[in-house]
Amino acid sequence: MIYRHSKLSLTLLLCTLSSSALAQNISSIVETQSGKIQGTVRNNIQEWTGVPYAKPPLGELRWKHPVSPDKWSSTLDATKPAQECIQVTPEGATGAEDCLNLNIYRPTSSDNNLPVLVYIHGGNNQVGSSAEFSPEFIAKNLNAVIVMVNYRLGALGFNPLKALNDGNPLDDSGNYSLLDIRKSLGWVKDNIKSFGGNNNNITVSGFSAGGRDVMAMLISPIFKNSFNKAIVFSGGMTTFNKNNAENIFVERLAPLVVKQKIKPDINTARSWLLTRSDDVRAFMYNLPAKELSTLFSDASMRMRNFPHLYRDGTVIPKDGFKTESYNSVPVILVSGQQEFSLFARNDPMFSAEIKNNTLTDNPRVLNNYNFAKKYGSMFYSLFNVNQSANTMFKHYHSPIYGMEFKFGSNPLITGKRLSAIGSFHGLFLPLFDKSKFSEFTQDALKLNGTQEVATAFRSYLKNFLINGTPNGQNLPQWNEWSLKNSSAGKSLLIMDANKQKSIIYMSNKYYTYDDVIKSIEDDNSISKEDKTKIIKNVLNGRWWSGPLDKHFSN
């Protein structure tokens, strides 16, 4: 009797396991509005990669608003790495024009109605991809559906030439990257329920250029009602005059016109490119994507070298962030205190010493580097949170939360590796994916204090994804940004840690742009000649350096 019962139990167990495996297999095949897609399970996370949200922007669709993909009848294989958009690398061009796709990740649980986090990668809107980090850990930790988006880059993603205009306000905007992102959000809204996501609880987020894109979405009429919350990592407010951008593009394109013997000299080529001629349009459409991807390869993270995010009046208002009309949703603005450290390391003035590990051998070079890192970071971190919050606050009708990472600068706490760059641009990424920047963070991530900061940070985000406020049990109170809190010194959540404990508290910036400029003028740690050189060649022309550029150009 006992034997028969055990045999029956074993049979039932095998059937249950078989049914579970079958259910898991079926759940990896999802019906979208375009057709079925087959995903996979990896590291206890379900994932679907390279899912098209629009037709390939090829041929006549090259500089057009994205359109929905054609429906497919067979099941689409969504288990291979997504194709990234064509871009320039030190080795040359990589990627493809056929790249309007996204990746979806979610826990293997049977939970439905999960919050959705849509992530826009960084890279100056010139480089990068949906593989910026592995979202497996946060999909599980945040219990959310994570969507990573690929969108057109460089001159294919932003192009202000009037010769490309066809009378459609979206096409004529030149902001094709933003149009791609808007299309991807529409796809998420229409399809994410099939993946267990709540299409009425979508948080859009982005880092660096992706963060600046998200900021632009907050003022863009075409993004109205396309998302419910926003998280901006090292973003800030940047737009560009479309007519000025066209002139910069013409300067880059004119040598190609002469090279192809279309026009005899640069001046004639410039004039020709500024016309609405069908010949100019044909020239642009016939340019190989690889050649277009390298057009601004020396941009050096400067808007004037690769202008984008145009104030066209349709996608971005003519008055930019001076607008009184925002897509007001709860928003978190995040920065690090040493935002410029990595940029300073990569600047030609210091990159050779950094590469050869000889920076500390020459006191003059070391002092110059520390000067650039210090003041660049002061400007950049102000720009990422304070400037945005102060500009938005008067006309923004939803909560604004500001956060700044402080930890990482003390070598006695986090070690020499991390202290070399401190709370750098992208510090949050290792808290999502420990493989990111591991050469700097591997020692610090082992500390109890760092782990507490990481846990608190993710808890704040999890709460925010669920209900639009980061606050919750066992977390220090995070105040909304307000004039009252700002004047009381409680407008900015500071994330710090010692070796054993997290140190999280409300504070605010103790300086303004004018304070930084005065500090630069009074700083005698480097020579006057070196100071002028750094201001003109390292700190200038950045999207955050407007006050510095204006003051020192006089």
Image: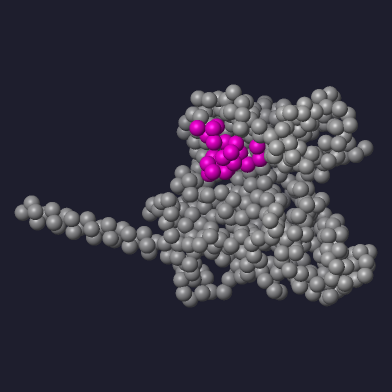
Q: Which colour scheme is used?
A: one colour
Q: Position of residue 216 (x, y in %)?
A: 70, 52
> Along the line of sight, which residue is nearer the eye, 128 or 479?
128
The residue located at (80%, 62%) in the rendering is 160
Q: Quadrant of the C terminus?
A: top right
Q: In which quarter of the image is the N terminus?
A: bottom left
Q: In this view, does 248 lie to the left or right of 72?
A: right
From this viewpoint, is residue 461 visible?
A: no
> Along the line of sight, which residue is nearer the eye, 71 or 4?
4
> Along the line of sight, which residue is nearer the eye, 291 or 44?
291
Q: Quadrant of residue 407 in the image?
A: top right
Q: What stretch is highlighted in magenta?
A: 424-446
Q: In this view, does 111 lie to the left or right of 432?
A: left
The residue located at (50%, 32%) in the rendering is 446
From this viewpoint, is residue 61 visible?
A: yes
The residue located at (91%, 64%) in the rendering is 266
> Along the line of sight, which residue is nearer the eye, 462 or 286?
286
Q: Quadrant of residue 27 in the image?
A: bottom left
Q: In this view, does 108 lie to the left or right of 297?
A: left
Residue 342 inside the magenta-drawn segment:
no
Q: Position of residue 213 (x, y in %)?
A: 68, 52
- The outermost residue toward the left is 1
- Examine the rendered structure and indicate whether residue 378 appears above or below residue 272: above
Q: Where is residue 381 in the image (x, y as percent from the top left)?
A: 70, 36
Number of residue marks? 0
- Examine the rendered structure and indicate whether residue 464 appears above or below residue 317: above
The residue located at (76%, 33%) in the rendering is 369
- Examine the rendered structure and indicate whether residue 294 appears above or below residue 537: below
Q: Where is residue 91 in the image (x, y as percent from the top left)?
A: 68, 56
- Examine the rendered structure and indicate whether residue 161 appears above or below residue 399: below
